[in-house]
Image (cartoon, grey):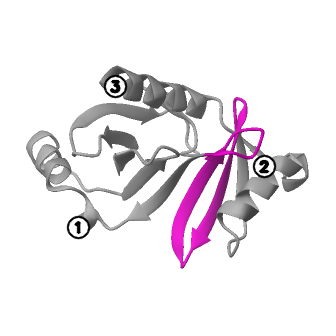
Amino acid sequence: MKKLIVMGTLCLALGNIFAQKIKDANVPAAVKDGFKKSFPNSKVEEWEKEDANYEAEFDVDKVETSAIFDANGTLIETEVEIATKDLPKAVTDYLTKNLAGKKIKEATKITDNNGIIRYETEIDEIDYIFDSNGNFVKKEVEKDDQGDDKKKK
């Protein structure tokens, strides 16, 4: 099961390497419908294409959120910005031990369509990914100045 989770995470991470901003007009109707069904009270601020998937960036109750859909409009995962105090203790312990003195720029909670939760923290343009228990999984290094495209490390 752990191998399956790691493989899924790697596939999503590799998809991030090829993310491109796209216009609303270029998003398939099925994807837009999937978004409306999943988030009926939200409006997409920006769309990105990640390989065969589509990422919508939007706010939910003034909280920065993004969701990834496949071409059929099926929700794959949702990423919600959280306060650093809401990270699991194991995450903050890891960061304190391994990145002492570094400041967390952003923290997010990622939930996939199976309900599996991961956490991501951004520190010095590097994203640190943790499993649902707060165990370190991997890091992704930003590969450009836009902060959208990442390279697995």
Which residue corresponds to the image point at 14% horizontal and 48% vertical from the top-left? 90
Residue 7, percent across and down?
A: 44, 22
Q: Amino acid at mark 3?
A: Met
Which residue corresponds to the image point at 31% horizontal and 26% vertical from the top-left? 2
Which residue corresponds to the image point at 77% horizontal and 40% vertical from the top-left? 72
Residue 27, percent across and down?
A: 84, 47
Q: Nearer the viewer, residue 145 or 40?
A: 40
Q: Which residue, given by chain and number where applicable, does mark 2 sit on?
A: 31
Q: Is residue 104 left or right of residue 9?
A: left
Q: Is residue 32 above or below residue 54?
A: below
Q: Which residues are magenta?
A: 50-75
Does the magenta run of residues contain 73? Answer: yes
Numbered circle sitting on residue 1: 3
Q: Quadrant of residue 36?
A: bottom right
Q: Is residue 118 left or right of residue 90?
A: right
Q: Nearer the viewer, mark 1 or mark 3?
A: 3
Numbered circle sitting on residue 108: none
Disc nearer the start of the sequence (1/3): 3
Q: Residues within 10 Å of mark 3 (few under 14, many from 20)?
A: few
Q: Secondary structure at mark 2?
A: helix
Q: Secondary structure at mark 1?
A: helix
Does the magenta run of residues contain 26? Answer: no
Disc nearer the start of the sequence (2/3): 3
Q: Secondary structure at mark 3?
A: loop
